[in-house]
Amino acid sequence: MAVILDARGLEKSFGAVTAASNINVAVEQDAVVGLIGSNGAGKTTFLNMVTGYLKPSAGTIHFEGRDITPLAPREITRLGICRSFQIPQLFNTMTVLDNLLVGVGIVAAAGSKWGARNSAYDDPVKAVDTMLDQFGLGSYRNRQAGLLPEGTRKLLDIAMAMVVRPRILLLDEPTSGVSADEKFVLMDMVMAAVKEHKVTVLFVEHDMDVVARYTDRVLAFYEGRIIADGAPATVLDDVEVRRFVIGSHAAPAGAASHA
């Protein structure tokens, strides 16, 4: 399988705090990759560097063979890397339908810059209704986004990222704030949609049941570096991961202290 995203030698510091240290990750097309680690481990920093919200202090990021390291977030999005957020970023006074139509409108306004993905929107409302059905949001079509329950807000935020037909989708804690009864329903819908559209997925998650069930690869972060990378069962059973990510918070051997 071809590599779609390739990060090499990524470094990022905030004063004396190292948020990323020699991050090397090659992600294959259509992979579903989970990012795990305690708060401040570097997971979201990695996503922010991939999407251009943060510029690495050193290293490069290539998407489909192109160096995207110096590009602005808007340019990276137009190339096909989209994301959702831990706190849903919605137009709260607008309906669910209109939230998704905003995404379609951005694609249409950008025209040829979106390449072949733009052709999917000859009929914007039909395209949005299809997305609403895929994410189980049809009954909320005309509901104001700010009045939705939290799990539904999460789904809408992810649908807004999906409606622009991304090549890579980055999710920051998709089940955060979602009830235990809803988390698997939410993830089933998301995974069905991304597989249908052949989207590569990287998602940050603290729920190890979700990680084990939906990923085919896991990256474990600790203090800005990756301490394990591999199949979910292997990584989740790794001694360092069990002790320093899933279990206690003691620093692994050789890790720098940021106290």
Image (spheres, grey):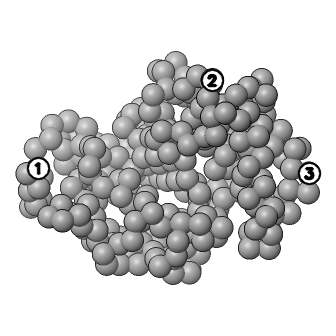
Residue 41 position, x and y percent, is 26, 51
Is 48 positioned to the left or the right of 161 in the image?
Answer: left
Name which of mark 2 and mark 1 comes first in the sequence.
Answer: 2
Asked which quadrant contains residue 78, the reply is bottom right
In percent of width and height, residue 231 lies at: 41, 51
Residues at marks 3 and 1, CA–CA distance in whole angstroms: 54 Å
Q: Position of residue 29 (x, y in %)?
A: 59, 64
Residue picked out by circle 3: 123
Q: Which residue is mark 2?
A: 147
- Name the residue at 26% across, 49% down: 40
Residue 228 appears in the picture as rendered: no
The answer to whether 166 appears left or right of 118 in the picture is left
Select label 2 or label 1 by which is in front: 2
Question: Badge 1 local density, few (<14 within 10 Å), some, or many (20+)?
Answer: some
Distance from the alpha carbon under mark 2 to that under mark 3: 28 Å
Q: Amino acid at mark 3?
A: Asp
Q: Which mark is residue 251?
A: 1
Query: Sequence-wise, which precedes: disc 2 or disc 3?
Result: 3
Verify CB contact (< 8 Å) between mark 3 and mark 1: no
Left or right, 114 with reference to 43: right
Q: Residue at x 35, y 46 (%)?
A: 36
Q: Looking at the rendering, in which quadrant would you find the N terminus?
A: bottom right
Q: Is residue 158 left or right of residue 132?
A: left
> In the figure, 117 relative to 87: above or below?
below
Residue 74 visible here:
yes
* Amino acid identity at mark 2: Leu
